[in-house]
Image (spheres, grey):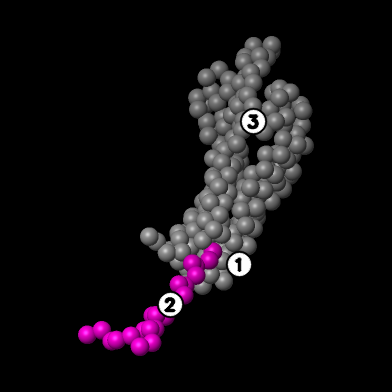
Amino acid sequence: MASKKTHRLIAAIIILVGAIVLIAALFMPWYSYKISEAGASETTNTYPGLPGSNGTIQYSCSGIPSCPSQTSYSKLNWNNTGALAEAGFYMLIVGFILGLIGAIFGFMARGNPRRVGPAVAFAVLALILAIVAPVLFAASLPNAISKDIPAAARPSSSGPWSSFWGSNSTTLVTPPITISQTWGAGSGWYVSIAAFVILLVGIFLLFIWRRDPPEPVPVAAPAAAPGAAPRP
């Protein structure tokens, strides 16, 4: 049976994996908005990052001659959306650093149970950021987009400016075409949730394995009875 030291090592490895998964979310799109018409489509993918960083907004297209080049929130004047992406960017980085520190203390706790406390504390802070980032993003993004994209530029009343997830179809009279829209969370948003789950498992295991079992108390051999004859 594995010792508590080995168990704490396993928990520290899980916390480290959670921190790595969290920073991986930084390089994946957190939101996608696809608009289609007459067999052609354009998908806008947004990433966490600084508002002025080129590549925080990227496009993928189908059925059209050319696709827009990657750009930034600042160039599109998406100031509110860019501020939200920047907040998520820093939360992911800080969460990764805290998770990494927690994992290091976890490795140290393998031979010293006193290191479990700091390991759990740092990992819990990383855990909080791992869940706050996607929740804040989902709760605040529609309002941010509604401020950045004027009503005149929206193809319909419902879209990313009205809800975090959704889809609809709108038929225009002039010209007579049907525009379909779908929008929702990208892979990075889900990966941050996955990092939260992994960190939660690592913290739980590290907590329940925080103490070594007590050392057995040595028992003295019974003394020979007085006057007993020694055994041959």
Magenta residues (range): 210-232
The residue that mark 2 highlights is: 219
Alpha carbon of mark 3 to alpha carbon of mark 1: how far? 38 Å
Query: Mark 3 falls on what kind of element?
Result: loop
* Along the viewing direction, whichever of 119 and 226 lies nearer the viewer: 226
* Along the viewing direction, whichever of 127 and 69 lies nearer the viewer: 127
Mark toward the start of the polypeptide (2 vs 3):
3
Residue drawn where x is 67% and y is 48% of the image: 132
Mark toward the start of the polypeptide (1 vs 2):
1
Mark toward the start of the polypeptide (3 vs 1):
1
The three-letter code of the residue at mark 2 reads Val
* Along the viewing direction, whichever of 3 and 51 lies nearer the viewer: 3
Contact between marks 2 and 3 (CB within 8 A): the answer is: no
The three-letter code of the residue at mark 1 reads Pro
Query: Mark 2 falls on what kind of element?
Result: loop
For marks 3 and 1, give the one nearer the viewer.
1
Question: Is residue 33 toward the left or the right of residue 162 in the image?
Answer: left
Residue drawn where x is 53% and y is 51% of the image: 201
The residue that mark 3 highlights is: 165
The residue that mark 1 highlights is: 118
Alpha carbon of mark 2 to alpha carbon of mark 3: how far? 67 Å
Question: Is residue 85 toward the left or the right of residue 101 in the image?
Answer: right
Query: Mark 1 falls on what kind of element?
Result: helix
Q: Would you say residue 106 is visible in this rendering?
A: yes
The three-letter code of the residue at mark 3 reads Trp
Alpha carbon of mark 1 to alpha carbon of mark 2: how far? 36 Å
Q: Quadrant of residue 33?
A: top right
